[in-house]
Image (cartoon, rainbow, N blue to C red):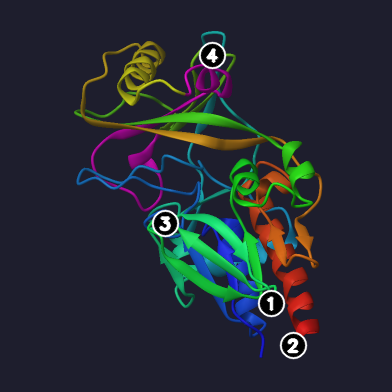
Amino acid sequence: MTMTIAIIGAGMAGIACARVLHEAGYAVNIFDKARGPSGRMASRRHELGICDHGAKYFTARDPGFRQQVEQWRQHGAVSAWQGRIDVWENGSITANNDHIQRFIGTPRMSACLRHASSDLPVRVGLRITALQQDDDLAWWCYDHQDGKHGPYSLVLGAIPAPQAAELLPRQHPFQGALAEVRMAPCWAVMLWLDAEVATSWDALRLKNHPVLDWISCEHRRPGRGGEPRVVLHANPEWSQEHVEDDPESVTVALRSAFSEIIQAPCNPVAQSAHRWRYARSVDCLGKPCLFDPASGVGLAGDWCLDARIEAAWLSGTALGLIASQHTGALS
């Protein structure tokens, strides 16, 4: 009998991988350090309203992913987002006429992942810190609370490339490929405001701004409601320069930049900052996933293909298919 497969990471890639394996009849255990399936599709809860402080939206170009998005939409977990997204550049704001169809999870970005994983065994609040393979070639996972999980026939990681490199043995054959992947950080600041933001746009993409990359009026997004609030994303360069700064100083800097953009004082009734250390894939692997049948280890994530949520789904799906074929051969 085939042993259970461990999947580390419950973001889009991890859940996509788990779904393929589950539907093929294999047992999976999913681990994630967060409170629930989300990855970078995370949201911050507050009594004044939810803020999506990770991924802004996603697109669907691949036919398989379009079909998946439509299924989520039919279950109310995804909505098309037709908000007005303008562009700031050199102090001027212009309309964005790219005609791209965008989607967001409803009532929060992670809703589609929570729907997709509703019948899967997801262990949240557990960070896997070490892997060990025994003499029978079975894998054991160790968490940050000294818990031991296993045995597993395969270990599949759906986490950022630098974290995968830290988790795998130094001599593992994936280390060379992982060293070539580069990921950039992003500071996100959430502001719950005392009044509506007087703008004609629902979101603003900023080009060549010294601090900001994105502004989103969260309460205007489908299925949100609640009090006025915005999410600010710093650009990769500023985030890298200030990656080790404290959240308070980062919040002050992004708030100041936001006030300059809207030409009005910013008076939040609540605020919060979050550092995404591995927010954006810059130099990607160039292949859908990594799988080593000799060691029984596989890796997936948007860093394999492209810095998009769709790419994470494609990568996780590809890994699930490869792993199921390998596991089937061992059965």
SS at mark 3?
Answer: loop
Q: Earlier in the sequence, mark 4 or mark 3?
A: 3
Q: Earlier in the sequence, mark 1 or mark 2?
A: 1
Residue drawn at 35 percent across, 42 percent down:
51
Q: Which mark is residue 331?
A: 2
Give the distance between the C-alpha atoms of the residues marked 1 and 2, in whole angstroms.
15 Å
Q: Neighbour class for label 2 at 10 Å: few (<14), some, many (≥20)?
A: few
Say which amino acid is labelled 1: Asp
Q: Earlier in the sequence, mark 2 or mark 3?
A: 3
SS at mark 1?
Answer: loop
Q: Is residue 218 magenta?
A: yes
Q: Earlier in the sequence, mark 2 or mark 4?
A: 4
4 vs 3, front mark: 4
Give the side of residue 25 with respect to residue 41, left or right: right
Q: Residue furthest front?
A: 135
Say which amino acid is labelled 4: His
2 vs 4, front mark: 2
Q: Neighbour class for label 1 at 10 Å: few (<14), some, many (≥20)?
A: few
Residue drawn at 42 percent across, 54 percent down:
144
When the figure is inspected, residue 267 is found, relative to residue 165, above or below; the finding is: above
Where's residue 242, x and y in %? 47, 18
Q: Which residues are magenta?
A: 217-243
Q: Quadrant of the N terminus?
A: bottom right
Near-viewer residue (128 or 299):
128
